[in-house]
Structures are given as structure tokens and as C-alpha cells.
Amino acid sequence: MRAWWVWLCAGGALPVARPFRVWRGGGLLSILIVCACAPTVLPPGPAVTRPALEDGGFVAADGARLPVRAWMPRNGDPKAVIVALHGFNDYSNFFAEPGAFLAGQGLAAYAYDQRGFGEAPNRGLWPGSRAFVDDLKAVTAAVRGRHPGVPLYLLGESMGGAVIMVAMTDADAPDVDGVILAAPAVWGRTAMPWYQRAALFAASHTMPALRVTGQGLKIKASDNNEMLRALGRDPLVIKETRIDAISGLTNLMDSALESAFAFDASALILIGERDEIIPSDPTRLLIRRLPRNGRHRYRLAFYANGYHMLLRDLQAETVWKDIAAWIADTAAPLPSAADKRAAAERARRSLAGGGAGQHRR
């Protein structure tokens, strides 16, 4: 029986695994006994230097250099600054077109390759959720130091959104004015059927180094086919993913979904109603868990023709304009009216007793 598959390519590119069959009964037990081993996690080393933002890169405390791309307004100082985090298997280039557009609106943006991705150290190996969170805090502090007094926002796509959610619920959360979460990766174990949880555990503890691809999966990450083909040709986008990296991603999504209870930041949450990567049930669970009486307001935006890769879909400019408008005035309606659509859908589901969230696919 087909008991497990990897469904997710948060950053954009393509799904990261093909279906495979799990052995039953004694066969599986024998494998667990003979081949049991722990997933590989490669955390940062000890602190050896002071973190620093340089031209083209960020040097972390352990000396690791994370490549950084930046987009600056041509005229004058930026009205606001964004630190952008890519998704799983992607890298900082995910923000090339949004960054250029937003720079034209007077906003500055920085995006960096997270550990294990792009041209960052230890490509393909999972560094642990805490490493991502600590790097985000350090990069954010460095960007804040470079642009003192300028409003600062975090933007995360999929896995990047999960990192931001965890960071913002820490006691020493980044000092920012707001966050933008684009299709946040929250498919934690709570939202998985038991057989997916069991198979993921078995696979990550028997064959953690096995690399899997997205061949054979009929999952549409975006309606922008030209962009998807370009990602397929890009050597910095990971195409073959280790099982233990997928397990690590699931741990991060667990933490992100759990953090929703305490998430209390000014936030714009962008959801594509045609998202085939993150199922609708975990997204609805996320929305139900968000505090209703926190100090800050959060804004939901539902895009009827939006896929997982909202920032690079064919209608991406609509999303970019909403982001710029929200940063300019977090209380004003979005130009696309995607926030009104979200409010109407939530009201409809509430009246129908279906809870809050996006359309069921």
C-alpha cells in the first residue's frame, strides 16, 4: 500500500519526492532493527566572530557566509526595508522580481540563502530549525543597524514563513514593524494522518540519506510555467532532497503551527486558494489558532487564482501591489480586495459551521 509521499516544495520549485511503498509487517520491522539510524542534522559551529552584513553576504557568528541579494530604491532613502526568506529547496533569487518591483515603490529588500540552500554552506543538509531562526534574528539586527529609524518588515515564502512564525514567538523576537507570510508552511504532524507520520518516521530513521525527486507527482506549484521551467534549469535550486531534510522541514512546520497560538504581530498573511502544496486543512488550523485579542492586527488575503508560489504566479504583480500598500498603511484595504474576499469567506464558513480558512480543494 502507498503509505507516504513527500508533498512539499515550499520555495517554489517543484515537489521534492516521488511516491514509494512502505514494507509491511516483519519486513519493515527488520529494516528498523538492522538499519536504524538517526537523521543527520548539521547545526552551526561555535561563535568565532561578530555577525556582519557585507556586500553580497552575511557572515554569521560561526563564520558561515550566507549569500545576500539586495534591491534598493534608485532615488532617495527607502520608505521601509524588507528582509525576505525563501522556501524549501529554493534560495534568495526567489525575490528577484518582487524585490525589483518593490524597489520601484521606494522599498528596500534583502534576501539571503539560508543554511543548506543555494550557495550557503552544507548544501542539501538540514541545520536544524533553531539555526534558521538564529540566523534570521542576526540578519534582521544587522539590517536594522544599516537602516536605523526605517520601518523594517520580514517576508517569508512557505518554509521562510514558518521560520518567521517561530522567531516571532521567541522571547527575543526580531525587532520589526510587521511580517508578511506568503503561503506559510504549516503542514505539521497534527494535520497529517497517522500513516504519513509513521512512514516519515520510519523512512527518516532507516534511510535518512536517500535522495528523492519530484518526478511523477502531478502537483501544480504555480500557473507560471515559464518560471517553473527556469527553476528546473537553475543549478542552485535543489532537485534531489534527502529524507532527513524532509523530516527536519516537518519538525519546523510542527513548531510553526504550534507557534500560532502565541503569534501576536502585525501581519499580512497571503493564501492562494489553488495552493496544491500546502493542503487547506493545515492552513485553516493555522487561522483558527491565531489569537483574536492580541495587541496587533493581522490581515488575511485570499487570492482566487493564486497558487503556492504567489510571489511568482502570473498574477504576482497583484500580490506585490498588495504588499506595498499594506506596508504603506496596514489599516487600509488592499488594492486587490483579497482581504475582503478572505473576510467574506471566513464569514460564510462561520455561518455554515465550517470554521475559518480557504476553500477546500
Image (cartoon, helix red, strand yellow):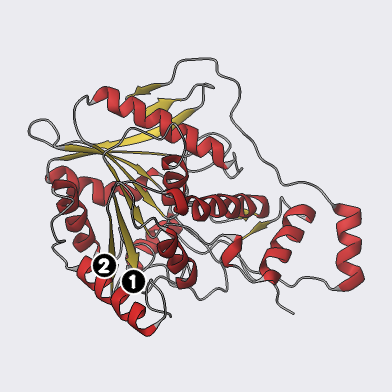
What x and y, as percent, mark residue 240? 59, 55
Residue at disc 1, secondary structure = loop
- For the question of whether residue 199 can be seen, the reply is yes
**Residue 146 placement: quadrant:** top left
Q: Quadrant of the C terminus?
A: bottom left
User: Relative to 40, is 175 on the left or the right?
Assistant: left
**Residue 283 placement: quadrant:** bottom left
Q: Which residue is mark 1?
A: 223
Task: Look at the numbered discs 1 and 2 and tell me whether their residues touch, using CB distance below 8 Å.
Answer: yes
Q: Which residue is mark 2?
A: 314
Say which of 23 and 257 sits in front: 257
Q: Amino acid at mark 1?
A: Asp
What x and y, as percent, mark residue 63? 51, 21
Q: In the image, is residue 273 above or below residue 151? A: below
Residue at screen point 61% across, 49% down: 248
Q: Which mark is residue 136?
A: none
Q: Residues within 10 Å of mark 1 (few under 14, many from 20)?
A: some
- For the question of whether residue 238 can be seen, the reply is no
**Residue 177 placement: quadrant:** top left
Q: How many marks?
A: 2
Q: Amino acid at mark 2?
A: Leu
Residue at screen point 54% across, 22% down: 62
How far apart in space, not on screen, are marks 1 and 2 (Cα)? 6 Å
Q: In the image, is residue 124 above or below residue 280? A: above
What x and y, as percent, mark residue 204? 72, 54
Q: In the image, is residue 314 above or below residue 122? A: below
What x and y, as percent, mark residue 1? 75, 80
- Residue at the farthest left position: 75
